[in-house]
Amino acid sequence: MSIIFLFIDGVGLAPAGENNPFSIAATPCLSGLLEGKKLTLEAADKIYDRAALLSLDATLGVGGLPQSATGQATLFTGVNAARVLGFHLRGFPVNVKLRKLLAEKGMFKHFLEQGRRCTFANAYRPEFFRHFTGKIRRTYSCSTLINYYAGLSFRGLEEMLAGQAVYMDITNEVLQKAGYDVPLISPQEAGKRLTAISRDYDLTLYEHFLTDRAGHSNDYASAEKVIRTFDAFLGEIVETMDAERDLLLVVSDHGNLEDLRTKEHTQNSVPALIVGKGNEEMAKVLQKKKDLTGILPAIEAWFEQNPYL
Ligand SMILES: [Zn+2]
């Protein structure tokens, strides 16, 4: 029994319309799970036959536009990081308070201490390992830091080539463009690999941030491409996971891509899409908080309800 946690950066829930690429792009997997609906505000806060979709508040009661460092720190610690700082912090958790929070309360450390096997499935580039001296760099993301502080190893391109890691862009296109001699893989193959990785763990995290990049670029064609790729990836995970035993959780940190009228983040709520075993129960736990702080306690409650086999 395990949880696959797909973190997708910069995806909010907005009403369907011409400015919302999620309501226009073909998303057969999402529409299948949402019984014909698209990943828009209208589909949220409902329990479907195979999935639940909740809207979570990403503003966290703090003024200004929600940002990545505080949003992700909140998702991965269960603590309202924007409140801790008093503002939303962009990009990377360069702030000492945020790093302390991630070091003390990071999801991986937390669940490892409970005897859970955790892994971060993303492949890192060789430069990351070359520069990895144990000193925290300013460009480390929240996910990198929770993995680091938990003492877990990082996967590289070698693991990726052996099918044991997935690059953040799903298909390796970004890696190829950056000059790496790696084969392109289909989103379906990437999805299959992620499911296979998750079988050896209780909690598997994968992070995808082309969604946020496409939102900042404000370009409809790239938005549609990113959404279709993600949907195909998701579809294969849903197909290959064991819905009787495993749970898939898809969550974002703040809105962006769902409103192409702006290149900035939005204050829209973000989706928590839950598929598989106990999705309805997890949705009920999340209903109580309905913001980014609810994710870690919801995972904890799922583990309690689904003890080791
Ligand atoms: Zn952003």
Image (spheres, rainbow, N blue to C red):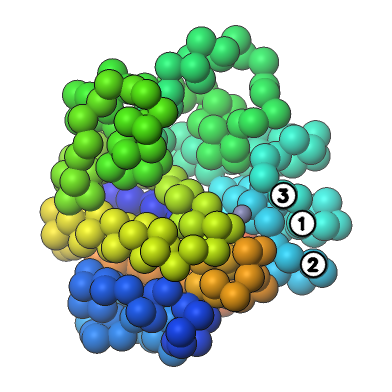
- Mark 1, secondary structure of its residue: loop
Q: Position of residue 201 (x, y in %)?
A: 30, 38
What residue is pinned by disc 2? 64
Q: Residue at x 53, y 39 (%)?
A: 143
Relative to 169, 107 lies left or right = right
Q: Nearer the viewer, residue 1 or 226?
A: 226
Res. 139 visible in picture: yes
Q: Residue at x 37, y 43 (%)?
A: 169
What residue is pinned by disc 1? 88
Q: Position of residue 69 (x, y in %)?
A: 67, 47
Q: CA distance from mark 1 to mark 2?
A: 7 Å
Q: Position of residue 21 (x, y in %)?
A: 42, 74
Quarter of the render that holds ligand 1: bottom right
Q: CA distance from mark 2 to mark 3?
A: 11 Å
- Mark 2, secondary structure of its residue: loop
Seen in the picture, residue 248 relative to 290 is either above or below; the reply is above
Res. 54 visible in picture: no
Q: Amino acid at mark 2?
A: Gly
Relative to 58, 181 lies left or right = left
Q: Position of residue 274 (x, y in %)?
A: 35, 67
Q: Residues within 10 Å of mark 1 (few under 14, many from 20)?
A: many
Along the polypeptide, which appears first: circle 2 or circle 3?
2
Q: Amino acid at mark 3?
A: Arg
Relative to 300, 99 lies left or right = right
Relative to 248, 7 lies left or right = right
> Looking at the rendering, which quadrant does residue 103 occupy?
top right
Q: Which mark is residue 90?
A: 3
Seen in the picture, residue 173 relative to 7 is either above or below; the reply is above
Q: CA distance from mark 1 to mark 3?
A: 7 Å
